[in-house]
Amino acid sequence: MDEFNPFERLRANWTLVARRVSAARSRQPPVDWRRVGLIVAGGLALVVFVGLLYDARVIAWTRTEPGSVRSFFAWTTRFGQSDWLLTPTGLIVIIVAFSDCRRVSRVHAAAWWEIATTAGLLYVLVTVSGLVADIIKPIAGRFRPDFVEHGAFAFAPFTFGGYPHYSFPSGHATTMAAVAILVAFVPSIITAPVVIAAAIVAISRVMIDAHFPSDVVGGALIGLGVGYVILGVAARAGIVFAKREDGSLRGRVGVLRRLSRRPGGLVGLLPALWIALGGRRPPQPPPT
């Protein structure tokens, strides 16, 4: 086997992913802007409906809740920040990208490919949806609920540089919706708990007076919408997902599932990664 060159493997792995994404984009059907417009209009209508009916009422109710309830939601809201997702997923992608999976078994190579592509897809989902939310925040310029003197419908459009008027949309809700749509399309034992946890984190933004309900709905719609578009590209590229004949998506994490069903099947993943990164193989016992 050729001498291990991590930077050469990085280039080869990046080229493989880039080719798949490029091919997927070339096969992408033309955008139906009428349909996109209807979806956006429907989302805005839902946000306005929630805002008019629930924003002021819900915020007034949350302020009557006991301190213990608010303390619980103040703790859970931390999990809606993107850094705790982006740091580990980014590290996984970088480490696997520098590895040479030709040095390990095909099963372990395929398993790490599934782990890295899923982590990379989650990184892209959270980053892109978060950027969209961050662009909208200063444009909308909505005041947050804890600035009560401004009321539920106070806006300062195109105001940059501050927490007070960055209420719409909720960035935490955007992040959690991006996570939820990914795990929903890769059904597993963690799908339901993750979706429930994502909903709790999104609700926490209202419970601690950081956002109005319509901010959370708007953020969730952005996360789901951006996520759906990116997942469609990933499916056409055969990354994490594949498209069935009926147009629905199926997850491509079969190797990890098979390893998880074997006793000790996942134990060899870390040693395999060490070898793929140029580490030495452990000494083999002499034949008996």
Image (cartoon, rainbow, N blue to C red):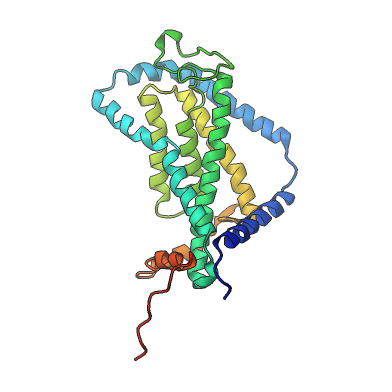
Residue farthest to the bottom, as pictured: 288
Q: Please name the residue shown 51% across and 53% down the image.
A: 93
Q: Please name the residue shown 38% across and 21% down the image.
A: 209
Quadrant in the picture for residue 273: bottom left
Quarter of the N terminus within the rendering? bottom right
Choose between 201 and 112: the one closer to the eye: 112
Residue 175: x %, y % from top left: 48, 37
Image mark count: 0
* Residue 10 falls left or right of residue 202: right
Residue 224: x %, y % from top left: 54, 38
Choose between 84 and 194: the one closer to the eye: 84
Quadrant in the picture for residue 149: top left
Whether residue 246 appears in this view of the structure is: no
Q: Please name the residue shown 39% across and 41% down the image.
A: 196
Q: Please name the residue shown 56% across and 71% down the image.
A: 3
Image vertical order of residue 60 relative to residue 283, above or below: above
Image vertical order of residue 22 relative to residue 64, above or below: below
Residue 84: x %, y % from top left: 41, 42
Quarter of the C terminus within the rendering? bottom left
* Residue 282 falls left or right of residue 226: left
Whether residue 56 appears in this view of the structure is: yes
Residue 98: x %, y % from top left: 53, 59
